[in-house]
Amino acid sequence: MRFAVPLLLAASALLVHAGDDNFNGRWDIQLLKDNPDKAWWLEISGAGTPGLKGKFIGFRGGDLNEIKDLRIENGVLTFSDSHAQDPQHFEAKFVASNGHLDGQMTGPGGPIAFAGYRAPVIRDQDDGTWLKSEPITLFDGKDLSGWTGLGPSQNLGWTVEGGLLKSTGHAQNLITTGKYWNFLLHIEFNVAEKSNSGVGLRGRYEMQIQDDYGKPVESHINGALYSRIKPLVNASRKAGEWQTADIRLVGRDVSVTLNGKPIIAKQKIEGLTAIAFAPFESEAGPIELQGDHGPVEFRNIVLTPLYHAQPQ
């Protein structure tokens, strides 16, 4: 049971310690367990001052959440998942010798040890200097060559029929065996009524797929960068109709054209989203297809790598 102690927390906020400001910044978080299928993300600001704030991706809902009970006491950062009946509790220490976070989550699904690494500076920008390489067909319409499941089960839950890649809605996420950095991705999908899915970019940034024809624009609708970047317009078609997405990713700059309409234009991705399992943002990563949130079909998945004529 958790108790509210606002007076105590208000007083303790004034007692800051030397070195608390080491927690400030954005952190890519690796789960230290066998076959992790998730990665987390944390942002801390105001550490070492009374204005301590934080954001976290990793709660069971996967949204970008403001942390409401964040505190640092005796050099240990702690917070809990206040969005669930059975909260998960997180503790992390800053390790001065390597500049990392060393932590543990307890509660439902735990305990899980984790390590946090400062989000890297990525210098690549979508500045018009990138050239197209030869396109790569990621799905040939015949089988799952070039794909594998994210998780230990051998039953992927996907089928290939009539040139289509299908999930009944209870499948593992699929990932490509190849890894990619800067690219254009063309993908066509058909999402069932009241269903949703997603496309993971580098195994860490999700373009949302969802049945939401005619709904208001927000950061979770079809074509959004999930919980981070909302589209300019809702360009969705009705459930059961084929839709096309063209995604351009250069460094942290992302652009999305949905059904022929530009809906995100060179927006900066601040960090991981809920689909992430590959935390290290300076590394190339796979394309990921979400299969456990309802029926969805895919076809014509083609990736075109982007490169500089002269290395930077």
Image (cartoon, helix red, strand yellow):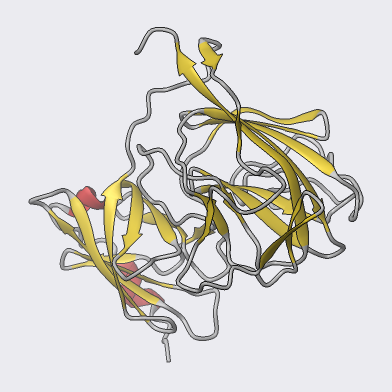
Q: Is residue 51 above or below residue 90?
A: above
Q: Position of residue 194 (x, y in %)?
A: 83, 65
Q: Position of residue 140 (x, y in %)?
A: 67, 42
Instruction: Give the x, y percent position of residue 298.
Output: 74, 50
Residue 124 versus residue 165: which sits nearer the camera? 165
Q: Residue at position x 47%, y 21% from top?
A: 125
Q: Could you tell whether 94 is left or right of 217 in the image?
A: left
Position of residue 94 relative to residue 253, above or below, is below
Image quadrant in which you'd find residue 187:
top right
Q: Determine if residue 222 is in view.
A: no
Is residue 9 visible in the rendered image? The answer is yes
Q: Quadrant of residue 104?
A: bottom left
User: Residue drawn at (68%, 44%), measured in percent from left and top?
Assistant: 224
Query: Residue at left 41%, top 69%?
Result: 69
Residue farthest front in this picture: 142
Extreme-bottom residue of the structure = 1
Residue 193 left/right relative to 88: right
Where residue 183 appears, x then y in whole percent?
Answer: 55, 28
The N terminus lies in quadrant: bottom left
Answer with left or right where residue 233 lies relative to residue 116.
right
User: Residue at the spot x=48%, y=40% of the render?
Assistant: 270
Q: Nearer the viewer, residue 125 or 288?
A: 288
* Residue 286 in the image: above or below residue 31: above
